[in-house]
Amino acid sequence: MRHEIAILAVPGVQLLDVSGPLDVFAEANRLLQRQIYTPRIIAVEGGEIHASSGVRLSADMQLAETQNYAPHTFLIAGAPGIENFAADDNLLHALSGLCQRSQRFGSVCSGALLLARTGLLAGKRVTTHWESAALLASRYPEITVDADALCVADGRVRTAAGVTSGLDLALRLVEEDLGREVAIEIAAHLVMFFRRPVNQTHFMRSDSASLSGRSALQELQRWVISHLAEVKTVVMMAEHMAISERHLTRLFRNELGMTPGQWLERERVAKAKQLLEQKSLPAKTLALQCGFSGADVMRRAFSRVTGITPAAYRKMTENNE
């Protein structure tokens, strides 16, 4: 098995949109001690690409040289301002050809805005960075944009949301190619979630709070997610921030449109989903690891958030394996 992974990097590309996925594929090569994935960086033109961070990337080929090139996977990386990127008919024709010749194709972050211009996303469900989601949906009403998903697979199309979710997407692709066990091991080595127990709605988007307040709330969220089994109440969350429960509730309503209790319940359920996908645990053990006081409490919360029971969710994931 040998897969070429080609990523188009436009001028001003977001570096992590390129390097993040490629590091996941490189880790697969390292763990299995053979060259399964071969990276290829494609430039619009020229041999050097200046990333938005100032780092320069060396391209393996130019877009004009890809007429007969058929990689296994082709992705378009995002870039600040990519919605205004000048793409003429020749460029879009070349992109469309690459997509059609690939076994799977897609985008990372705002790269979906350029991919959509090929017309190949019509009738597809995709995701993109939450700041680009409304623009993508308004420009291309024939596309179903899921702004709250980290990764979406629809037929041959694979899309990832924000910058770091490019790693999540690459991990999903490795799972498709090499199986779940390999993907889980890669996630462990890269110190990342195999299935991240969050989605984009869990992150702050509003501009109503101060930057310092938003930063503190993000730190709280990270802390809670890392200590779900120990964080029993909203009072503990407020104490961690050294503010009143009432003030914490106001922050959550302003930033997330929900109460701290609602957010905490959703995170517990997200953790339960992650564990249900990875291992078989007794209901009581699962509940304790997610911070629920008991299996019955977990079952009610899980059904309230997802619409199905934990047992039904586990059966569904087993059938999809």
Image (cartoon, rainbow, N blue to C red):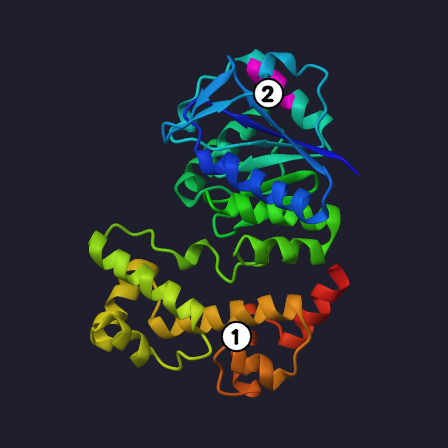
Q: Reading the chain from its start, which is encountered first: label 2 or label 1?
A: 2
Q: Is residue 241 magenta?
A: no
| Observer-nearest of 308 and 1 | 1
| Secondary structure state at the residue bearing disc 2 | loop
Q: Is residue 94 magenta?
A: yes
| Observer-nearest of 134 and 46 | 46
User: Badges 2 and 1: C-beta atoms under 8 Å apart?
Assistant: no
Which residue is rendered at x = 43% and y = 31% of the image?
79
Q: Quadrant of the C terminus?
A: bottom right
Give the class, few, some or many, for how many residues have Cα within 10 Å of label 2's Cα (few <14, many ≥20): some
Q: In the visual, does 245 lie left or right of 44?
A: left
Query: Amino acid type of disc 1?
Result: Arg
Which residue is rendered at x = 21% and y = 71% of the image?
247
Q: Quadrant of the N terminus?
A: top right
Whole-percent x, y for residue 189 in the image: 57, 55
The residue at which mark 2 appears reads as: 60
Q: Is residue 140 visible?
A: no
Whole-percent x, y for residue 194 in the image: 59, 58
| Secondary structure state at the residue bearing disc 1 | helix
The dot on residue 119 is none
Whole-percent x, y for residue 77 in the image: 51, 32
Which residue is rendered at x = 55% and y = 81% of the image?
287
Asked which quadrant contains residue 227, the reply is bottom left
The residue at which mark 1 appears reads as: 304
In this rendering, the count of numbered labels is 2
Query: Amino acid type of disc 2?
Result: Asp
- The magenta segment: 91-96
Q: In the visual, does 113 lie left or right of 97?
A: left
Asked if 212 appears above or below 33 in the picture, the reply is below
Give the class, few, some or many, for how many residues have Cα within 10 Å of label 1's Cα (few <14, many ≥20): some
| Observer-nearest of 116 and 245 | 245
